[in-house]
Each structure stands twice: as C-alpha cells, then as structure tokens.
Image: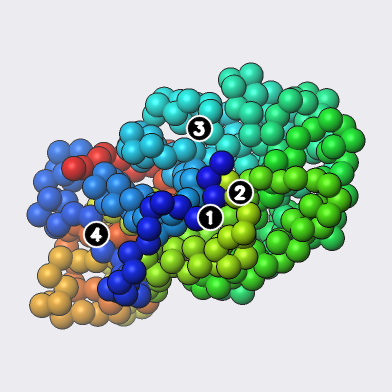
Amino acid sequence: MKGVQSTCMLTETLVPHATRQAQPVLSFELARELGARYGTPLLVVSRPKLIETYNKMREYLPGVEMFYAAKANPDHHILSTLCEQGCSVDVCSFGELQAAVRAGFAPDRMLHTHPCKTESNLLDCYEYGVRWFVYDNMLELEKMARLTPDVNLLLRLAVSASSSMINLSAKFGAALPEALGLVRAARRQGMRVRGFSFHVGSQCLNPEDYRTALSRIREVWDRCADDGIELEVLDIGGGFPAPYRTDAPSIESFCQSIHSGLEDVFGDLPIRLIAEPGRGMCAESVSLITRVIGKNTRWDMPWYIIDDGLYGSFSGKVFDHIDYSILAENADSRELYPCVLAGPTCDSSDVVSRDQMMPDLEVGEILLVPSMGAYTSASACPFNGLPVANSIAID
C-alpha cells in the first residue's frame, strides 16, 4: 500500500509562479506548415508538454497514483503518451476502455468510475478484466452484486465546492449521512468496498476545496472504522484546473496545497491514494489551428467565419462553459478591432466569440487557440456533415 508519506520528497523551495497563462504549444510558423500539410482545423498534441504536466503532478503530489480521466480527451496521442510514462487510466465506458487498450493500457491499470452503468457497460468492462468500479446508490450496488460480485468497489461521495466551474456532485455521489449504510449494505451482499471517491467539481480554482472535502470524508471514514469496516483506498478525483482566458493556479502550488491537506487529514493512515486528473493533465498540451474561411461586415461589425466552431473543437464552450483565447499572428503590432468570430455551420448560434479584439483578418489567415486539450474534440460532432478536427502529435 502506498501511504500519504512518500520517499519522493516535495521541493521545499518556493513555487516560482503561482499562476499560469494559456500558451500555444507551437509557433505560427509551424502552424502554417502543419496546416498546409494536414489541413485545418487541426488539433496539435505536444507530447513534451503532456509529459511535463504528468511529471509535475507526480512530483508535487507524492504518493498519489495518477489515473488519467479518459473522458477529458481519449485521443490516441494523449493516451499512448501517458501509458508510456506509467500513468494509469480512469474509464467510464467500454468505448473508453477500447481506446485505452489501443493505447497500450492493460485492465489492471484501469479504474471504472461511472456510478451508474448500463448492464452492457458493466459486463463488457468486467469481461475484459477491469476489477475496480464505483457506485453511489443501492440499486447500482444490487446490479453489481448480481452481475459482478467479485469486484472491488469505491463508494463515491457527494461533496460541495465553492470554486468549481461545474458541480459534479449535482448528479453523482451519495450524501455523506448515507455512506455508512451503503457500505454496510455492500458487506451484507458479500461485496468488497475498498474505500471512498469524491470529485470537487470541474475546473476547481481553489485547492482549499479539497481540504474541506477531505475533512468531511475523514469523519465518514472514522465512522466506518468504528463500525469495524477497514477501508484502504481514497480517490480524490479530478477537478485540477487549466488556464483559458482566465489564468489558473500553477500545477506546483495547486498540488502542494492538496498534498498538505492529505497529510493533515489522512496522514496518520497507511492508505492508497488515487487521483483522476483529466482537464488539468491534458488541456495545455493541445493547441488548435483554425483558419479564416470567410469575412463580412454586418451592422458595422466585422464578422469572420472560421473552419471550427461550437459543434467542433469549441464544443467545450457550450458543454464546459469555457472561454478560449484566440490568437492572431503579430496581434501586438497590428491595430485591433471589436469583431465576431463564428463557426462554419449553418446554425446562427454557432458563434465562438463576440468580445475578443482582432486585427483585420484575411481569408486564409491562421489563428491559434491554446488549452484545447480537454472536453473539446471529446464532445465534437460532425453537424452539417462537416468533419471534426484531425489531430497530430509533435515532439
């Protein structure tokens, strides 16, 4: 068992930068070259950036196993790179499992975290060899007791967080007062509850939210111990933020704060610790190359049509409430104007931005969008018969 204490020591020097800004992973020169070679829109995955992020999380969260949340982006370039680095993977469906297998992951490096699974989802993943699953209610427990009685279970608990963009406990997670009853019920049915999991919410900007959640969960943990139930695994979920038009805390400062909370609240227990970073792991490693395909002046406002939009890589603007920075080449030396940037579909709501200043763009001009690795291509669709962006990897 891995404990909170680790032989991997945290760097004791001050974190050099408390915040980080969204930065593209390639230059405009390389973007033009790749756009000409592969076409646009094009998502460019930087393997070195992804590896850097993974290594920083491991360094500043010593003793915590990383299970990359494939839901954020199941792109093969991302999954295979993390697999090569020794990361494990969090899957929510057989489709995500298959993507992980193609990237090299074995089932013993997988954790299935969907709290409400179809029978086929459960059985397909079980038959492939996955043995770690999550539940948060009695009916889900009864389903797994009937179909997969020998699995290891984590009970997902609902927690509140003040700084997260999306409250994931609004849909999943057992209320804390219900936890002991759900663990007892599992024992009565011969199931093994190995620990708890929680998720503070997507795009959490204040790591103190983890400490608050940890303190409340420790109370439930101790109630289970008093009842003779020995737990051994704590999954702190994801929520690690990424920079967009708004800066985000640095990985170092964010993870150091979580580590401190883990030591203060659970440091006396020799437990196994798991995290499920998705957005925080992959977002900054991908930049979008998109091209201006049309321009017009409507009601005295410049409009630019680009070849990616809300139905494509900017789907995160709709589903994930994210506002992306859109960069034009040499913008600091060109006069900037208010404008509208719109996507390529026939839907009039397909507008990417109404409040970003741009120079006078020409048809064919390349734009770069950083931090496009999370919940972008994962939720894109070919509406209007327009293809979603291809992806390539660079070293």
Q: Secondary structure at mark 3?
A: helix
Label 3 – label 1 distance at C-alpha: 20 Å
Which is closer to the viewer, label 4 or label 1? Answer: 1
- Residues at badges 4 and 3 in contact (C-beta under 8 Å)? no
Label 2 – label 1 distance at C-alpha: 7 Å
Label 4 or label 3, whichever comes before in sequence order: 4
Question: Which residue, given by chain and number where applicable, does mark 3 sit on?
Answer: 109
Q: Which label number is shown at residue 271?
A: 2
Label 4 – label 3 distance at C-alpha: 31 Å
Looking at the image, residue 333 sits to the left or right of residue 172; the answer is left
Residue occupying image coordinates x 40% and y 70%: 253
Residue occupying image coordinates x 84% and y 60%: 177
Label 2 – label 4 distance at C-alpha: 39 Å
Residue 304 in view of the camera: no
User: Is residue 75 positioned above or below 106 on the image?
Assistant: below
- Residues at badges 2 and 1 in contact (C-beta under 8 Å)? yes
- Give, as a three-letter code, the residue at label 2: Ile
Q: Alpha-carbon neighbours of circle 4 within 10 Å: few (<14), some, or many (≥20)?
A: many
Question: Which residue, given by chain and number where applicable, does mark 1 sit on?
Answer: 4
- Which residue is situated farthest in the top direction here? 127
